[in-house]
Image (cartoon, coloured by chain):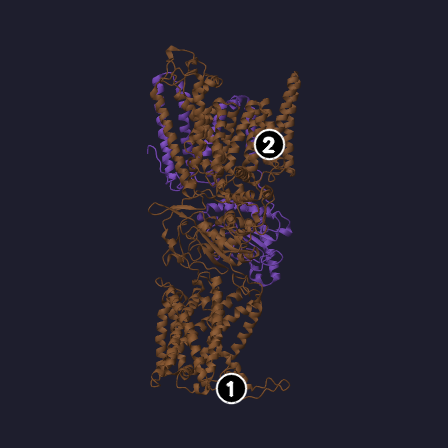
Chain colours: A brown, B purple
């Protein structure tokens, strides 16, 4: 006998066997290592993190199991999911995965290995992939031999089709299910081959584990009966089949019913009927066989045959009847959609909407299995060649598996094992044939025997043949089935062997490269963290999801309900720990449709839905900026479809397309589309990001209109770095309802704006007057300014203020910081100086506190005589004058809302703004009061002061008390304070104007709302304010006009303070959700006092200063206020209610995200 | 039209509306359950004071309009309308089926802003007990994503009719006859074909062809309704998640050839008794394997542009 290459001789068979088994064990260990290692790309490229969506829930459940024990887990009711329904978790999940992790966790901790539960969860899938490789090895070994087994193990270890669901972090049911699937099949084959009840029972136990772990167990439930049925049809009924099947079915079914989620399904639903039916059929056939073996009458056997057939038919009729009567549930939608592929889209869009339920195009097959794809049919062919019972199983599995994988991308996973097995059979047969060193005899020498190879081969296949001579004859029988006798087939020569082997190894190494590339590029993205490449090729991590979820976790109350599309429910629960409306456990279609309806309706329709479900935040995923294609706009049609399924009257899919049937988001988008909540939230302020350039949606490659959507009922709360996650806060119901809300905001804004501008004017005018006073005193009364000159001075001051207000907020802040110290110092100095001076030259304490001098024009009046009490014997006129004096403090106590107006530029505004306001109030209160006291002490004669030549009587007071030098010193300080005061008021007014313009509530808002890119301040608004101030300054030419203006100012501002307070204590009681800082229960008394005071003071402010005013000294405040409010109301009635929608917040954000423009997100299509 | 003289009186009062209803009932009866509309009768049918509802098909059946979908959809529409005309009178007179042809009233098409046909609008009742709870009186559009078949059409329109439309798909005589004849023929020839049926290679061929077709994306093209080739004559669809019908054939064939080379190398060549012929076969089939595999990879690179590997070309 000749060999193609020399073989070592003299090796004992034991050495060969031992070496071969050692090599096998080492190879298997290496394969396991490779399987685990190739799944760690995700951990190496990113971090040890749970992936995608469902794993987040599994992880959360596992944490409950690990921390609270199994019984708590079993009874776990999760009130935060499916808000407000909640979810009974214990009874609605397959607990196998969590239980596995829990057991591993407890074992490790019992061994004093404190491994974090998260790391167990992350690494569970790679660990089980090693077990899968082993199970596949065992399975294939039954099919062919060890060498094929090793190949199959290697294939399944690195095939992307399986890796896609089992990378580190992919903590999903499939992670352990494929191992269970393969091992159950192995046990089944073993039970069938040996007729072993032990292996049948083992198959049953692992089937139970599988049932507990994955809904896909139905695949086993139907594969094994199908195999058994076909074997019966092929006339291969044996007692081995009977024993194997019966033990598997009985134990497996009884055990599977222990899983609460499965319950009595195995005897009640159609999916399980095949297993039950075949079980019954086997009993009948076994009985028939038994009877036949005891009888010999041919007629009786015929009769029996008929009876068997009849019973079978009756049995199936019974099943059909029971199904028809409803005793047995018909096929559930998920399974039914596998047969009638159009079913899901029509009737259960929620299933059809999942991307992993889409049909598979051929590139996916090639991507996932590559080389195996064409070895697979070759392997099936070889199975047909042998066609033992286990080969029949592989063939059935192959045909059924390829159909299922073609229908659903997800089921590629169940196809992968059989492809690996059958490809391994093909390739190992090829290698066996070409490695085999035995050369066939040349035909002329016709030698019949091929027995010489039994002892001396080194290859694994050779050693196997040595061990198991049974397999050899089977093959040779098949091969030699051709009738004419000829030599043993084989390969001639070495080069022929080498070329085939070289080709095979080339293909295998290509396969390894392919798998590595696919795994690292396509399947290792956690999809929670996305990777992209910078222009220079380095990796850029996009971490928007976690950024947003952690924002929710850290910035919202724990009870805030977050609404999002169901895809993100598990992630929000897992990472943000907030209640969600819907999540990936899609058990309640109506609830999901409700969310779909809210997303696809207009704001007006959606708002009541949101409010009814206590939604605080709405979260949308938007990929338009960086081109992340899995965003909500691309999923939007499914939301529409699902909502349409429940509300066909209100939501209609065609409305979301253009008249030409296109799905567009740009100018041509349909009105329904543009008004839908989802569209508005996605594109809200999107165009602004491009700073006037053409806004582009990079997912849909459409140019967005410059004027983006506006939101009335939601506030933008958070947008992540790359705009992938956007969170919107649902506004609380307004105190007076929607329309009034807008109206109120409108009139409140106008009142405020009037007051703010007038205040700037009065401050600047006073400042100018203070300067003229100082000059007057400094020149000893020689330089007296007339109105025109004062006005000129005021314009100069206004311009200086304009420049300062245009400067960046940072500079203004620095200035006002210094101002605060100077202010406090100067006020204290002035108070102290006046008090000190008044000790030598002042009035007595009694006079200072009680003396009433009436210098108003209200001189006449009758006495009020409440004789019985005798206390109120005050002249009416003087009493009135006393009341009018209340208006004086109002000038001081104004403008403390400045802090609120610039709150959008402040950090932590919700808390710091009210504190700032309160501090301002207290500070003004205390120092104002002290100052007035000291001024009263220093005032010897009011008449003298009023008779002063100086424009400001207060200057005279200081002059009298402190002398010229002392007065000028303090006065200059006060001027500087007044000047800085003007700046801060100017900033304040300009921000109010800007805010109002941003809401499009001013004529020409387009200009006023622009922000200067260099200073980052609303420069246009500043100069608008200054221009108005100058115009108002013209009133300074008339005293009456000036005091009217001042009155109007205070009335305007106080009205704007009063409206919200009034609403708060009346119709809005209980509607306000307290912020981080609140007055608590004291809001009511404080509110009542405030409103009463405001009404009281405003009435006083509108009164003229004399009893019978001439036109020259009339208080025209009432006219001004009335004019403004009339104009505003008229404007509202005429047009604003059409476009004014209330305040638009403008949370500053960093625009650095524009740097990542060329980012292309590589995302696996599997969601 | 016989009834046009009534038209000027129509919207005036309730009584007139009764007349309108009678007019419509007569029109429907005359058209076998389907009203053939023109501009006037359209206004009558969709009068703002209607206490009935209506389903209206806007179509363009004229040859000149070349509206193939219209012709495809029209029979379904007529069938469903006919089914509705069989309902009891008290229900039948509350909902009308109508067809408005483009050539009968172009003005109506313009008024409604319709740019394509066929379109089905369902007008809800604007008054009376059958008014929608939401108060909507504007029409809703039927979604053709369910296809042009009468079954889903009847099912969806039943949401808007007083009682469900009693539409039953016509009995498929041809299909059943064919099945029966086929089954009979199978039984008759069973004796002759049973050797074929019992041959494992028949089953092998069947199984392997099924598998090849399935893994080449056949179900994808079935479910998505992909065309056989692209509109521009290309046979490879752009994009990783997309494919044309012809790709199924090409890819299945490539897989088949590759599998065949392997099978031949395993089964056939070792049986070759002549060393030289065997050597030639081995070289030829290995080369074929490599070559076809390279072609497959090249095609895959067209589908997945980011794929970094290639073989021969």
**Looking at the rendering, in which quadrant would you find the C terminus of chain B?**
top left
Judge whether residue A731 can be spotted in this image: yes
**Looking at the rendering, in which quadrant would you find the N terminus of chain B?**
bottom right
Where, by quadrant of the figure, is residue A46 drawn? top left
Where, by quadrant of the figure, is residue A284 drawn? top right
Q: Where does the image place residue A21, in percent across and percent down from the top left?
A: 45, 23
Q: Where does the image place residue A585, in percent across and percent down from the top left?
A: 55, 45
The residue closer to the viewer here, A742 or B41, is A742
Pinpoint the chain carrying mark 2.
Answer: A
The residue closer to the viewer here, A673 or B137, is A673
Pointer 2: residues within 10 angstroms few (<14), some, or many (20+)?
many
Q: Where does the image place residue A192, in percent across and percent down from the top left?
A: 56, 25
Mark 1 falls on what kind of element?
Answer: loop
Tag 2 near tag 1, CB within 8 Å: no
Q: Where does the image place residue A144, in percent across and percent down from the top left?
A: 47, 24
Q: Is residue A759 above or below residue A507?
A: below
Q: Which residue is mark 2?
A: A252
The residue closer to the viewer here, B282 or B24, is B282
Mark 2 falls on what kind of element?
Answer: helix
Q: CA distance from mark 2 to mark 1?
A: 103 Å
Q: Residue at x 57, y 71 (%)?
A: A1088
Mark whose residue sits in front, 2 or 1: 1
The residue closer to the viewer here, A869 or B172, is A869
Judge whether residue B37 can be spotted in this image: no
Q: Is residue A438 above or below residue A228?
A: above
Q: Tell me which numbered mark, 2 or 1, is placed earlier along the sequence.
A: 2
Q: Which residue is mark 1?
A: A858
Relative horizontal placement of residue A535, taking residue B36 as reference (left or right): left
Pinpoint the chain carrying mark 1.
Answer: A
């Amino acid at each position: 006998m000749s060999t193609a290459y020399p073989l070592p001789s003299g090796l004992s068979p034991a050495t060969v066997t031992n070496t071969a088994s050692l090599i096998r064990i080492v190879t298997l260990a290496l394969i396991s290592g490779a399987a685990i290692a190739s799944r760690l790309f995700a951990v190496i490229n990113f971090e040890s993190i749970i992936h995608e969506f469902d794993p987040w829930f599994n992880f959360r459940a596992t944490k409950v199991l690990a921390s609270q024990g199994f019984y708590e887990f079993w009874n776990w009711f999760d009130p935060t999911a499916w808000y407000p329904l909640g979810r009974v978790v214990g009874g609605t999940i397959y607990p196998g995965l969590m239980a596995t992790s829990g057991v591993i966790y407890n074992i490790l901790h019992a061994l004093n290995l404190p491994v974090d539960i998260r790391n167990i969860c992350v690494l569970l899938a790679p660990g089980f992939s090693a077990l899968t490789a082993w199970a596949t090895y065992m399975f294939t070994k039954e099919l062919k031999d060890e060498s094929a087994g090793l190949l199959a193990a290697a294939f399944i270890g690195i095939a992307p089709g399986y890796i896609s669901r089992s990378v580190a972090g992919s903590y999903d049911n499939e992670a352990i299910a494929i191992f269970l699937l393969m091992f159950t099949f192995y046990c089944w084959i073993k039970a069938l081959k040996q007729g072993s009840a032990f292996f049948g029972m083992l198959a049953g136990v692992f089937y139970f584990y599988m049932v507990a772990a994955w809904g896909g167990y139905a695949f086993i439930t139907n594969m094994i009966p199908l195999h058994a049925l076909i074997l019966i049809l092929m006339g291969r009924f044996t007692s081995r089949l009977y024993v194997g099947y019966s033990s598997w079915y009985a134990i497996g079914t009884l055990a599977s019913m222990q899983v609460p989620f499965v319950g009595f399904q195995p005897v009640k639903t159609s999916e399980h009927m095949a297993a039950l039916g075949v079980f019954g059929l086997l009993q009948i056939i076994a009985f028939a066989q038994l009877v036949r073996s005891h009888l010999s009458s041919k007629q009786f056997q015929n009769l029996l045959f008929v009876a068997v057939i009849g019973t079978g038919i009756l049995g199936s009729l019974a099943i059909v009847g029971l199904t028809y009567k409803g005793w047995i549930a018909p096929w559930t939608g998920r399974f039914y959609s596998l047969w009638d592929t159009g079913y899901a889209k029509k009737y259960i869009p929620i299933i059809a909407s999942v991307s992993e339920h889409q049909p598979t195009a051929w590139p996916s097959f090639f991507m996932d299995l590559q080389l195996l794809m064409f070895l697979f049919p070759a392997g099936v062919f070889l199975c047909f060649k042998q066609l033992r019972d286990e080969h029949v199983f592989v063939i059935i599995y192959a045909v059924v598996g390829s159909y299922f994988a073609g229908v659903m991308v997800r089921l590629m996973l169940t196809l992968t094992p059989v492809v690996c097995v059958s490809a391994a059979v093909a390739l190992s047969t090829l290698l066996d044939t070409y490695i085999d060193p035995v050369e066939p005899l040349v035909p002329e020498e016709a030698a019949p025997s091929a027995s010489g190879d039994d002892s001396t081969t080194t290859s694994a296949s050779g050693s196997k043949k040595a061990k198991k001579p049974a397999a050899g004859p089977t093959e040779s029988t098949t091969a030699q089935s051709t009738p004419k006798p000829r030599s043993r087939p084989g390969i001639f020569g070495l080069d022929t062997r080498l070329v085939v082997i070289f080709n095979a190894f080339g293909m295998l190494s290509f396969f390894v490269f392919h798998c590595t590339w696919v795994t690292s590029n396509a399947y290792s993205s956690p999809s929670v963290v996305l990777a992209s490449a910078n222009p220079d090729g380095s990796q850029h991590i996009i971490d928007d999801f976690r950024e947003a979820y952690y924002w929710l976790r850290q910035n919202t109350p724990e009870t805030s309900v977050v609404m999002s599309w169901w895809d993100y429910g598990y992630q929000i629960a897992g990472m943000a720990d907030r209640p969600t409306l819907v999540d990936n456990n899609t058990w309640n279609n109506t609830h999901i449709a409700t969310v779909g309806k809210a997303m696809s309706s207009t704001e007006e329709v959606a708002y009541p839905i949101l409010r009814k479900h206590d939604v605080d935040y709405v979260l949308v995923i938007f990929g338009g900026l960086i081109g992340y294609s899995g965003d909500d706009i691309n999923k939007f049609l499914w939301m529409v479809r699902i909502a349409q399924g429940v509300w066909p009257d209100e939501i209609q899919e065609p409305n979301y397309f253009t008249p030409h049937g296109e799905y567009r988001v740009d100018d041509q988008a349909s009105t329904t589309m543009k008004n839908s909540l989802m569209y508005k939230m996605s594109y809200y302020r999107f165009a602004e990001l491009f700073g006037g350039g053409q806004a582009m949606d990079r997912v849909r490659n459409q140019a967005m209109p410059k004027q983006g959507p506006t939101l009335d009922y939601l506030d933008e709360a958070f947008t992540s770095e790359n705009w992938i996650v956007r969170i919107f806060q649902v506004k609380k119901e307004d105190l007076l309802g929607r329309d009034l809300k807008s109206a109120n905001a409108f009139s409140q804004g106008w009142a405020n704006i009037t007051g703010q501008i007038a205040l700037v004017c009065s401050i600047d005018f006073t400042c100018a007057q203070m300067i003229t006073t100082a000059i007057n005193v400094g020149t000893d009364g020689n330089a007296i300014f007339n109105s025109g000159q004062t006005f000129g001075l005021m314009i100069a001051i206004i311009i200086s203020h304009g420049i300062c207000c245009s400067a960046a907020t940072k500079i203004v802040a620095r200035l006002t910081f210094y101002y605060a110290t100077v202010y406090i110092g100067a006020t204290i100095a002035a108070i102290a100086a006046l008090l000190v001076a008044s000790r030598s030259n002042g009035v007595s304490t009694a006079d200072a506190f009680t003396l009433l001098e009436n210098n108003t024009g209200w001189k006449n009046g009758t006495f009020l005589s409440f004789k019985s009490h005798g206390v109120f014997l005050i002249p009416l006129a003087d009493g009135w004058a006393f009341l009018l004096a209340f208006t004086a403090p109002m000038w001081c106590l104004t403008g403390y809302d400045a802090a609120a107006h610039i709150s959008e530029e402040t950090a932590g505004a919700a808390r710091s703004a009210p504190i700032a306001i309160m501090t301002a109030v207290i500070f003004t209160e205390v120092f104002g009061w002290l100052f007035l006291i000291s001024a009263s002490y220093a005032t010897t004669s009011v008449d003298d002061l009023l008779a002063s030549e100086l424009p400001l009587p207060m200057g005279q007071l200081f002059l009298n008390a402190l002398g010229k030098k002392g007065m000028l010193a303090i006065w200059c300080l006060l001027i500087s304070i007044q000047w800085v005061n003007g700046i801060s008021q100017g900033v304040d007014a300009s921000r109010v104007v800007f805010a109002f313009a941003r809401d499009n509530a001013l004529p020409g808002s387009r200009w006023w709302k622009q922000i200067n890119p260099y200073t980052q301040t609303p420069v246009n608004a500043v100069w608008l304010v200054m221009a108005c101030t100058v115009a108002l300054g013209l009133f300074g030419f008339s005293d009456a006009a000036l005091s009217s203006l001042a009155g109007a100012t205070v009335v305007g501002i106080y009205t704007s303070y009063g409206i919200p307070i009034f609403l708060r204590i009346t119709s809005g009681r209980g509607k306000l959700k307290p912020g981080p800082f609140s007055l608590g229960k004291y809001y009511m008394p404080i509110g009542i006092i405030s409103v009463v005071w405001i009404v009281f003071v405003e009435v006083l402010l509108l009164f003229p200063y004399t009893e019978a005013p001439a036109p020259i000294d009339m208080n025209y405040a009432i006219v001004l206020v009335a004019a403004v409010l009339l104009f505003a109301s008229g404007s509202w009635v005429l047009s604003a209610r059409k476009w004014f929608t209330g305040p638009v917040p403008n949370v500053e954000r960093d625009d650095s995200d524009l740097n990542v423009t060329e980012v292309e997100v590589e995302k696996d299509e599997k969601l | 039209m016989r009834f046009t003289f009534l038209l000027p009186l129509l919207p005036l009062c309730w009584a007139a509306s009764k007349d309108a209803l009678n007019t419509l009932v007569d029109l429907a009866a005359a058209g076998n359950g389907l009203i053939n509309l023109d501009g006037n009768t359209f206004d009558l049918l969709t009068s703002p004071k209607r206490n009935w509802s209506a389903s209206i098909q806007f179509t363009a059946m004229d040859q000149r309009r070349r509206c193939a979908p219209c012709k495809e959809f029209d029979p379904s529409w007529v069938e469903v309308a006919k089914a509705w005309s069989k309902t009891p009178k008290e229900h039948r007179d509350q909902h009308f089926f109508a067809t408005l042809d483009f050539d009968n009233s172009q003005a109506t098409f313009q008024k409604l802003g319709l740019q394509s046909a066929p379109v089905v609008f369902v007008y809800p009742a604007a008054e009376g007990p059958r008014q929608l709870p939401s108060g909507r009186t504007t029409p809703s559009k039927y979604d053709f994503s369910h296809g042009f078949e009468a079954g889903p059409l009847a099912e969806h329109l039943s949401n808007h009719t007083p009682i469900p439309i009693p539409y039953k798909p016509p009995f498929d005589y041809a299909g059943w006859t064919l099945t029966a004849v086929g089954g009979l023929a199978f039984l008759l020839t069973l004796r002759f074909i049973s050797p074929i049926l019992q041959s494992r290679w028949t089953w092998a061929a069947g199984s392997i062809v099924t598998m090849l077709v399935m893994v080449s994306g056949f179900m994808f093209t079935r479910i998505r309704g992909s065309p056989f080739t692209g509109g521009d004559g290309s046979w490879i669809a752009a994009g990783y998640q997309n494919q044309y019908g012809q790709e199924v054939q090409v890819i299945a064939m490539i897989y088949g050839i590759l599998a065949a080379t392997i099978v031949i190398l395993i089964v056939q060549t070792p049986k070759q008794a002549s060393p030289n012929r065997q050597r030639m076969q081995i070289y030829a089939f290995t080369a074929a394997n490599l070559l076809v595999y390279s072609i497959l990879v090249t095609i895959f690179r067209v589908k997945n542009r980011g794929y970094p590997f290639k073989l021969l070309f």
